[in-house]
Amino acid sequence: MGKLLLVLSLILPIWAIAQTADTYIQAGNSKDKIKNYNGAIQDYTRAIRIDSTNANAYYFRANARSNVQDFSGAVSDFTQTIRLKADYPDAYYYRANAYSNLKQYESAVQDYTTALRYKPNNADIYHYRANAKANLKDNVGAVADFTKAIELTPNNPDLFIYRGVAKSNMGDNAAAIIDYDKAIKWRPNSSELYYYRANAKAALKNYNGAILDFDKAITLDPNNAEAFYYRGNAKSNMGNNQGAIIDYKNAIRLNPKLSELYQYLANAKTNAADNKGAIVDYTKAISQNPKNGELYLRRGVAYYNTGDKVKALTDLNKAIELKPEAYPEAYRTRAGIRYDNKDYGGAIDDADFAIKSNDSDESAYATRGASKAAMKDTAGALADFNTSIQLNPRNSYSHYMRGNIKRDTRDFHGAIEDYTQAVTIRPDYMDAYLERGNMYARTRNFSAAAQDYQRVLNNSPRSEEAYLKLGDARALFRDYQGAIDTYNLGFKINPKNTAFLIRRGVSKSKLGDTQGAARDFNQVLRIDTGSAEAYQNRGNLKAGYGDYEGALADINKALSQKPNEEGYLFLGNAKAGLNDYLGAIDSYNKALDINTNSAKAYYLRGLSKANLPDSLGAMDDFKKAYENDPQDEDVFVYRGLAKFALQDSINAIQEYNTAIDMNPNNSDAYLYRGLAKYKLQDYRGAMMDYNNAIQMNAANKMAFLRRGELKEFQKDNRGAIDDYTSAIALDTRLRMAYFRRGMVRVQVSAEKNNGCLDFSKAGELGLREAYDAIKKYCN
């Protein structure tokens, strides 16, 4: 913006001084005119030697020194001129120019101000003082001086240009554009003017207008690298990343050393999802500026987007090393990597720093919330997700994660609302559709659940993970046949994926197809002889039909390979089935060592303590279970079982009532309440509860068994036989159902043979008392 002034030489008349000094001054002026400035300096120096008090000699030598770029010498001579003649206005003016060329702008402003006292209507002095003020970042003062210069010379386009620049520098881009508009009327073919106006429009986010001006600037000067560069920025801000990339490449062709050019090119590639290309350009930028932490940050983010978390972490660490306090985004991104690596404590530490630096960082709150959720800090996680959503209501991830919190705390309708928000914001969010489907199923809106599950499958027809999750969701909500069908489809895609067989086996066991379940677990073990999950689930299957010794062998083998919470819970259940309650408690303790917040481990241990009986210890465990998961109705179901075991049937019923209030579709709660009523001889109430249990879950084999026992007690032999038969259909290894059906049949002469066969089957399945019955009724 500055403009170098060539100081005009003046021919003075001969004054009343020594003839020889005047002669040298005139000779110097003559050489000045032909731009022989060094020769002129020699003549002025000779004049000074003759007369060291000659102000004009110093003044002219100062001018000549300015013209040979010796600005320090010029300042010295102008200063001597002023000492000899304090009212020499041009000496102040030109010394100010010399100061400006030396970047000593404060001194320049002082001299321009002094010169204006002598020449208050000199537009050039206002002009150059404005330049000096602009260089001091005093843009307000600069604008005032340019305005005064314009009043004195209103037809000078340069003044409008420079005032426009000063206005832009002070953020008044709208006013700057008005000045550029006026200048363009005088200079319609000035590439520079269109370039300036384009930048002002871009600053006002008028990117379309900016691009039009950059287009004009480039048309007038196709070699203007900066015009390509900043037009690229404007296009990038409009989301036209491909157009920006083309402009940045043109700028590189014209001037590859433009500051930050490779960085902006890389940014545009990142925004265009070309992360690999971005990494190449960030690497070039880093080679030019290896101490720029932001470049490592951006390249780290690009590596993260390509899935290379190792290199991403290296770059983020480097960015933080270079400027530990400067890049909150580096901490936030590193928090995400640490979360993915299950380093939840480290993730929280990084997110804390990001939030401390910027308490409006919605993503940092989301990552911290996810880490807290993984560490079972439900309240802290929920608070973070709430804050994230408050900062950005369209953060789909935070809605999804908050939905998970609500799901886990049994706020199913609240979870549905959050999942719906997530898919509304991001229609391709398959995990959110899957979880919403789970919640619809949990609230018995099966048609809506089916639509969500089908959407997941339509989106990922060959995704093994989608089939596994969909099958798991259906199994979770007791749609075991639907789960099996889904696992079958997934298994067709990849017959080597043993997870389908294991999960299919579990679902088959829930439907009473113990043989089919065993076949699936055995098939897994043929494929992978060391599959801990297969041994564990086969052991649990054996416990379900009373083969507790076989169960213990399988479960222990699994735990020796892969200790886990669920395995110890299965082991405890098998021991409890053998009435080894102390052994069961030991297994539940090991489950709690792995997960100290396991409500299930606490209530299962509480039930075993009740069977010892250790009523105080049992109730303490149920209290801990409730504290860890107050929304889990099974806490109340099992506390009811414990009270029932402690011969407190009335209070057991109260616990079942609470469970049913929490979840009216809990089939087991009705079943166990029916047992308690039966014990209290409330047979009508028991029958109603057994009916409800079966209505809630038609695959509840124990509900059929208990209803059959009640019908048998009421002498409804036909009804009892039908219920026992239904129980057997659900689980062909349910030995007690065979035994009870046999007891009914042997009372009817026409059914006696079938009854004896039922006793035989029950004995075959391991029920010793069946053989006593055979001796009594069949021989």
Image (tube, grey):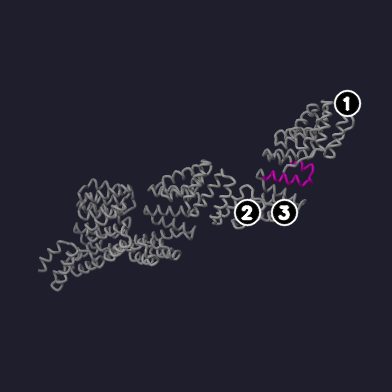
CB atoms at circles 2 and 3 under 8 Å apart?
no
Mark 2 and mark 1: Cα distance apart in space: 66 Å
Q: Left or right: where does residue 554 sit relative to residue 52?
A: left
Residue 290, percent across and down? 56, 44
Q: Which residues are magenta?
A: 146-168
Mark seen at residue 248: 2
Residue 184 in view in this figure: yes
Mark 1 and mark 3: Cα distance apart in space: 57 Å
Residue at disc 1, secondary structure: loop
Mark seen at residue 221: 3
CB atoms at circles 1 and 3 under 8 Å apart?
no
Mark seen at residue 18: 1
Location of the C terminus by quadrant is bottom left
Of circles 1 and 3, which is in front? 1
Which mark sits nearer the N-terminus, 2 or 3?
3
Q: Is residue 18 above or below residue 176?
A: above
The reply to whether the magenta stretch includes residue 439 is: no
- Residue shown at 84% from the left, 32% from the top: 43
Foreground residue among 399 and 56: 56
Mark 2 and mark 3: Cα distance apart in space: 16 Å
